[in-house]
Amino acid sequence: MRPDRAVRGASLSGERAAWETAFADALRRGDPLAASTILRDTGRKGWVKRAELVRARGVVDDEIHPAPLVRRDWATRLLAHPRRVDKELAAQLLLALTRTHQRDVERAALRLARDDEREVRETAAALLGAALDDAFDAYLPTVRDWVATGDSRARRAAVVAAKLAVRPRHPERLVSVRELVEAARGDADEYVARAVRSATRKIEGRGPRLSAA
């Protein structure tokens, strides 16, 4: 079982934390910002553990069951606020919409990718990577476009997302991901170049080696 599923399973099998009840109640009232504040209070100085974010997603997905438009509205409202936890929770909410609301997911990922906080930028790459993994053919043109024309932060998010979409169960993706990473090779921005090197290492474990940088 994947670790996040294990955490979600624990959350829904009687080992529920007190904050999860308050979090769910806030969402039932239609107040995602209050829910985000409750989630924020599980951490220290605004830092919320990934495990708690996963538990929050479990409450939303498995208990609240918001309609897609409600989920999108909550995410939009959260993205309008400056706190890191609001942005991270918004990304968690959008994970369920990768197939049905592609443009909303892409806009949110781009906004998060350009954020000044590194952790938020990592959230953007994870969201885009999950979307690419879930609907590879649909998101691939966007990821290619970000590599070709985006600013450095968008380019970096695209490369990381492509790396996250490399899966043993999907060997047919490897050629497209390799081409995308090759297109970013030689990028003058070190932020992007590090992502390219990391993606290259992963790809080399799945197929013929890429040419040297």
Image (cartoon, rainbow, N blue to C red):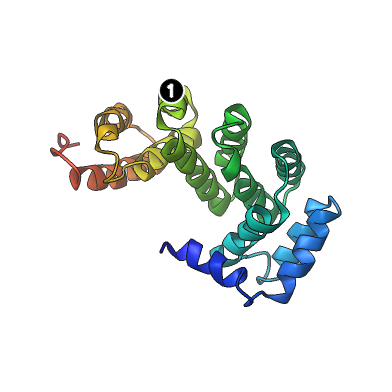
Image location of residue 47, percent across then percent down: 62, 65
Relative height, residue 199 to residue 40 (above, below): above
- Residue drawn 81% across and 62% down? 25
- Residue nearer the viewer, 53 or 144: 53
Image location of residue 114, percent across then percent down: 57, 38
Which quadrant of the figure contains the C terminus?
top left
List the single residue furthest toward the front: 13
- Residue 83 lies left or right of residue 13; in this view the side is right
Local crowd size for mark 1, using a 10 Å CA cut-off: few (<14), some (14–19), many (≥20): few
- Counting the numbered discs, the total is 1
Give the quarter of the image for residue 35. Answer: bottom right
- Residue nearer the viewer, 70 or 166: 70
Image location of residue 205, percent across then percent down: 19, 48
- Residue 115 lies left or right of residue 32; in this view the side is left
Relative height, residue 12 to residue 95 (above, below): below
Relative height, residue 36 to residue 140 (above, below): below
- Residue 16 lies left or right of residue 212; in this view the side is right
- Residue nearer the viewer, 147 or 193: 147
- Residue drawn 46% across and 26% down? 138
Q: Which residue is mark 1?
A: 141
SS label for mark 1:
helix
- Residue drawn 68% across and 71% down? 42
Image location of residue 93, percent across then percent down: 64, 47
* Amino acid residing under circle 1: Pro
Give the quarter of the image for residue 134. Answer: top left
Which quadrant of the figure contains the N terminus?
bottom left
- Residue 207 lies left or right of residue 118; in this view the side is left
